[in-house]
Image (tube, rainbow, N blue to C red):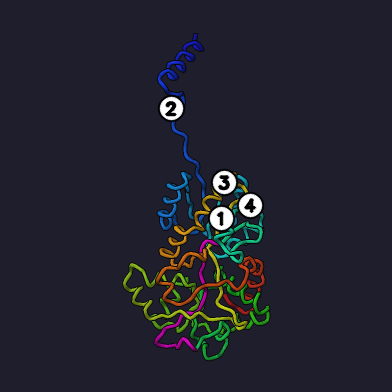
Amino acid sequence: MLLRLSALCVSLLLLLGLTPSVWAAEEEPETIYVYSASEEHLVRPLLDIFEKESGIHVKMTTVDRAALDSRLALEGEDTPADAVIVADVANLYPLQASGLLQPVTSDVIKQNIPQMLRQKDDLWMGVAMRSRIYFINKDKVRASALQYYEDIEDETWKDRLLVRSSTNAYNQSLLADLIYRRGEEEATKWAAGVVDAMARQPEGGDRDQLRAIATGVGDVALSNTYYFGQLLTSDDPSDRKLAKKLQPVFVKSMDGKGPHVNIRGVGMLKASDKKEAVTKFFEFLTQEEAQKFFTKHNKEYPANPNVAADPVLQAWGFEPKPQVPVEMLGELNAKAMAIFAKVGWE
């Protein structure tokens, strides 16, 4: 009797032009989960655009970079995350070395992102660029006084430089860059020169170094470019005022090539079974709309060479060009850490 009633109900629904699925709860849209070093609200407008265009939802969890490796190792194949977005190759390479990433093969990505900014097996790729250079207090230093990274080794800079700790990935990758270009001996001389030039023991982040030289604590700071851009356009008038006292100096290395360039990068976790959705998301991040978002809001340089940088960055007169395959910055990270320990860069 129950079977007959069920059959009758289905027949009535069909006669009305309906199907049983109409009465069921709507199926949830496909969702990908991302671990990011940035807070979600900072990129939510960009994620909303992707969701509207693709129908794929993105849920982002902010994960402290220092804890990311251990968290993923602990979660293993049960991790809820499908992808990661992190700053600096030094933060991507350990995931690669631990076998936690899977390749993302895409003609769109290869067309939009130069090979120098991608891992050779497509395990990760850059979606934005930044350079790590010197910044000077214009009232105390002439820009022409610093033409090379290695100029800081001169004793005239003693007690004048501000820089953050060697535990910071940005410093590790800069030193790895110099190791690749000039060899361990010359890179060690540079790191020792930085230690001798320090006006104080390393403390704080890049913004702290920039604010400090603007207020006279030191004369020169080592910082990523986007921090300066963010200070110039800050909602805080005091930051904008301090930034006007500073000037970026796009130094070369003694090899004659341009400044160190690094990335904000993305990678798909090996545990993810949503390869198609994650690939679409990564492709979106390399295209014009997302690239313009990164450069406008974060003051990073577009990784896609066909997209123009924000006017604030263009005013500096610098176009970033990677001098080193960025993957090498990860491979040489251990050697950089050994040099830091050797020269006493805390």
Which residue, given by chain and number where applicable, does mark 1 sit on? 108
Q: According to the image, label 2 marks what residue?
A: 22
Highlighted magenta segment, given as a residue range: 126-144
Position above or below: 200 against 299: below
Residue on which disc 4 sits:
102
Q: Quadrant of residue 299?
A: bottom left
Q: CA distance from mark 2 to mark 1?
A: 37 Å
Q: Is residue 132 magenta?
A: yes
Q: Secondary structure at mark 1?
A: helix
Please say if the residues under marks 1 and 3 sit with CB atoms less than 8 Å apart.
no
Q: Amino acid at mark 3?
A: Glu
Q: Answer yes or no: do the residues labelled 2 and 1 have beta carbons within 8 Å?
A: no
Q: CA distance from mark 1 to mark 4?
A: 17 Å
Q: Nearer the viewer, mark 1 or mark 3?
A: 1
Q: Earlier in the sequence, mark 1 or mark 3?
A: 1
Q: Residues within 10 Å of mark 4 (few under 14, many from 20)?
A: some
Q: Amino acid at mark 2?
A: Val
Pointer 2 or 1: first along the chain: 2
Q: Are marks 1 and 4 in contact (CB under 8 Å)?
A: no
Q: CA distance from mark 4 to mark 2?
A: 38 Å
Q: State which tag comes first along the sequence, 4 or 3.
A: 4
Q: Position of residue 180 (x, y in %)?
A: 66, 74
Distance CA(mark 1)–CA(mark 3): 13 Å
- The prevailing secondary structure element of the residues shown in magenta is strand
Q: Amino acid at mark 4?
A: Gln
Q: CA distance from mark 4 to mark 3?
A: 12 Å
Discs 4/2, front? 2
Front disc: 2 or 1: 1
- Give the residue displayed 55% in from the left and 84% down from the top: 148
Instruction: Identify the residue under disc 3.
Output: 276
Instruction: Work out whether residue 194 can be spotted.
Output: no
Q: Residues within 10 Å of mark 3 (few under 14, many from 20)?
A: few
